[in-house]
């Protein structure tokens, strides 16, 4: 469960023209729910997601995730929270280009104190889940766009987080791959994970599973 | 200690991004190589000098005429020996023998092997020499450098010296001086006193100088006074004068190198700093991605720290190993001329390995701290900014 109340984010607050990226945002997302944040570029979607992931601190407001207030966590706790609760999928996939698929999926586990066998098993499971197991040893720079994204999803799943956050996940995919992505999303949703997606792709207007669309404009939520 | 997963990941990224590090490793290794060569060379030289000085007699006196050292009468010995506190008094015949028509010259030392030697190295040498066979013919004891030189001129068993009257004097190569005090005695030839006198054309009642020891330091100054009262034309050199001259010379050269080194090291650090400040957008993005995956700032810094540390340690070990080989196996071609006035060292020198661990350690610290700071400060600045870039 995610509860957001009175959230504001101002960039460059001390400059002559401070930038209000988020204005008085309130939003509640139930556990297992899928929420689509839609809105034009610059409306504040990414900023909202990065605050939920504790990558950024809000200027004011409350953010409570799974009962824990995360708005003002110091870095060490914020990272721990991210590692435990959040899986990220980026628009440009954000893969480490010199590594293979398997090695990329290992990255979120490398800072944790886990045994080698445990890590191998988790990585295997995540790759299987994201249907990228057959490319495990391939360098990611040799993958197609769709494969890259599945690798990114496997990486997001490897820590078994309760919340999956996708920022413009289909922006670099063709229609066929976008559909495959939505299928995969549907199976992740079926497992009861909470899903947050920022997008302006109309393909998300009709999803084959229950979801809620939240529209953003100029840093405000205008329609839930 | 980082966990095994972390170490695996560190080694993995290092191995996969070798090309990214190769330039830095190369320059670091080169810098450490240069510095450690200079260091090895100068500490080996200083070690030899200290050893040599330690072995030198405390005092050497000679007769001066018109400001020029001339042959010293042998009869001075008795009066000097009568001064309280003086021991191991040894007359010496020393001079440079020029190997005509080349410009090379030997330092020829004529000694009486039956005398008590005031020079500790010679004392040792005499102890190890079979005196009977040395005196059974015209014998030469030469240093390693002279031996190599003679060999390269096809003198394997004997060498002929030209006497003042134009005749040749053939002498047998009897032994080679042990390595050790090598550097200074590098061009030394030891012969009997009679042979030296003959070669230099000295009278039977003359020597080059007279050396002796004064075991009690407190008496050194009074001894100098007593000597000058004894003879108006005596010149006295004590060991401290020589030590001071050496120290001045090497402090000057060492200081020059240190300045050059600091300049190049700081340039290198500046370049490193810039390289990591403008970290390629890929690297910035990778750091941002790791942060979004749940890595803390500390985790990112730890990764980069170990990465840089492995580079520093590897370059340091490689550089100092190369320096060691260059100086002690190859005898530092090129660098020797800068450190030693080549006019004094006409023959091949080989250096006795001597490593000043303290200095080597402080170079490592200095280098490692500079390197790590130049890498980690910019990385830290990237890591603390919100990793939004990963999301774009
Ligand atoms: N780090 C930042 N510094 C300054 N302004 C920013 C920063 N990140 C985002 N912004 C601004 O905040 C606004 C919202 O951006 P963003 O959340 O990325 O929107 P969206 O994801 O909907 O395109 C934009 O005007 C953007 O320029
Ligand atoms: Mg965005």
Image (cartoon, coloured by chain):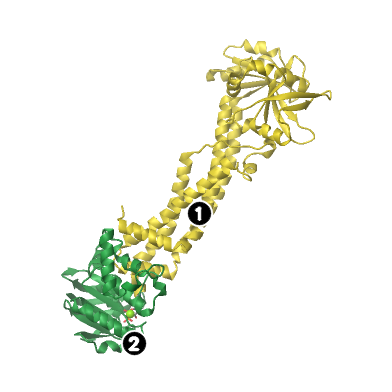
Image location of residue B181, percent across then percent down: 59, 30
Vertical arrangement, residue B332 with respect to residue B82, above or below: below
Vertical arrangement, residue A215 with respect to residue A119, above or below: below
Image location of residue B266, percent across then percent down: 51, 54
Q: Mark 1, residues whose alpha carbon is within 10 Å: few (<14), some, or many (≥20)?
A: many
Give the yellow chain's letter. B
Q: Quadrant of residue B211?
A: top right
Q: Which mark is residue A12?
A: none
Residue shown at 26%/69% (left/top)?
A: A125
Q: Colour of chain A?
A: green
Q: Is residue A164 left or right of residue B150?
A: left
Q: Quadrant of residue A42?
A: bottom left
Q: Chain of mark 2?
A: A
Q: Are marks 1 and 2 on the same chain?
A: no
Foreground residue among B201 and B182:
B182
Image location of residue A193, percent across then percent down: 20, 75
Residue B222 seen in the figure: yes
Q: Which mark is residue B28?
A: 1
Q: Residue furthest right?
A: B166
Q: Is mark 1 within 8 Å of ligand 1?
A: no
Residue shown at 68%/16% (left/top)?
A: B135
Q: Which mark is residue A175?
A: 2
Q: Is residue A148 left or right of residue B186?
A: left
């Amino acid at each position: 469960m995610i509860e957001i109340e009175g959230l504001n984010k101002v960039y460059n607050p001390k400059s002559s023209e401070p930038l209000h990226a988020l204005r008085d945002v309130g939003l509640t997302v139930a556990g297992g729910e899928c929420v689509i944040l839609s809105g034009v570029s610059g409306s504040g979607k990414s900023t909202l997601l990065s605050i939920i992931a504790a990558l950024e601190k809000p200027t004011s407001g409350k953010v409570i995730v799974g009962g824990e207030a995360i708005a003002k966590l110091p870095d060490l706790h914020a990272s721990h929270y991210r590692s435990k609760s959040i899986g990220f999928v980026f628009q440009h996939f954000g893969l480490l280009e010199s590594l293979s698929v398997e090695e990329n999926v290992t990255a979120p586990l490398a800072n944790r104190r886990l045994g080698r066998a445990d890590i191998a098993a988790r990585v295997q499971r995540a790759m299987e889940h994201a249907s990228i197991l057959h490319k495990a040893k391939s360098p990611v720079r040799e993958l197609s766009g769709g494969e890259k994204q599945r690798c990114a999803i496997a990486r997001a799943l490897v820590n078994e987080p309760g919340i999956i956050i996708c920022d413009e996940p289909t922006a670099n995919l063709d229609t066929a791959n976008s559909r495959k992505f939505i299928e995969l999303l549907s199976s992740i949703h079926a497992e009861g994970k909470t899903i947050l997606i920022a997008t302006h792709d109309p393909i998300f207007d009709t999803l084959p599973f229950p979801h809620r669309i939240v529209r953003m404009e100029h840093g405000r939520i205008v329609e839930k | 200690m980082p966990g095994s997963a972390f170490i695996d990941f560190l080694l993995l990224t290092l191995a996969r991004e070798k090309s990214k590090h190769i330039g830095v490793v190369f320059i670091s290794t080169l810098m450490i190589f240069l510095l450690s060569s200079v260091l090895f060379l100068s500490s080996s030289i200083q070690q030899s000098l200290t050893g040599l000085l330690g072995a030198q007699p405390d005092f050497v006196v000679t007769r001066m005429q018109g400001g020029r050292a001339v042959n010293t009468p042998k009869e001075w010995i008795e009066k000097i020996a009568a001064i309280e506190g003086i021991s191991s008094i040894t007359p010496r015949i020393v001079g440079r023998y020029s190997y005509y028509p080349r410009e090379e010259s030997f330092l020829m030392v004529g000694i009486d092997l039956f005398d008590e030697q005031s020079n500790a190295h010679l004392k040792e040498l005499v102890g190890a020499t079979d005196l009977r066979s040395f005196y059974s013919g015209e014998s030469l004891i030469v240093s390693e450098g002279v031996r190599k030189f003679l060999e390269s001129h096809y003198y394997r068993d004997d060498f002929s010296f030209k006497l003042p009257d134009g005749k040749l004097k053939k002498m047998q190569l009897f032994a080679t001086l042990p390595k050790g005090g090598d550097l200074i005695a590098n061009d030394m030839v030891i012969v009997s006193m009679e042979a030296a006198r003959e070669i230099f054309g000295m009278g039977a009642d003359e020597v080059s100088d007279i050396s002796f020891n004064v075991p009690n330091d407190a008496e050194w100054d009074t001894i100098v006074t007593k000597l000058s009262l004894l003879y108006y034309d005596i010149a006295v050199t004590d060991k401290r004068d020589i030590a001071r001259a050496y120290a001045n010379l090497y402090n000057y050269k060492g200081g020059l190198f240190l300045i050059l080194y600091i300049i190049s090291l700081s340039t290198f650090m500046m370049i490193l700093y810039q390289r990591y400040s403008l970290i390629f957008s890929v690297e910035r993005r990778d750091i941002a991605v790791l942060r979004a995956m749940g890595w803390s700032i500390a985790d990112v810094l730890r990764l980069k720290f170990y990465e840089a540390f492995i580079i520093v340690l590897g370059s340091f070990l490689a550089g100092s190993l190369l320096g060691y080989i260059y100086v002690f196996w190859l005898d530092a071609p090129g660098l020797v001329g800068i450190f030693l006035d080549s006019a004094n060292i006409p023959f091949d020198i080989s250096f006795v390995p001597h490593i000043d661990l303290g200095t080597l350690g402080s170079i490592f610290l200095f280098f490692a701290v500079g390197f790590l700071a130049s890498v980690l400060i910019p990385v830290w600045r990237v890591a603390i900014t919100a990793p939004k870039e990963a999301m774009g």
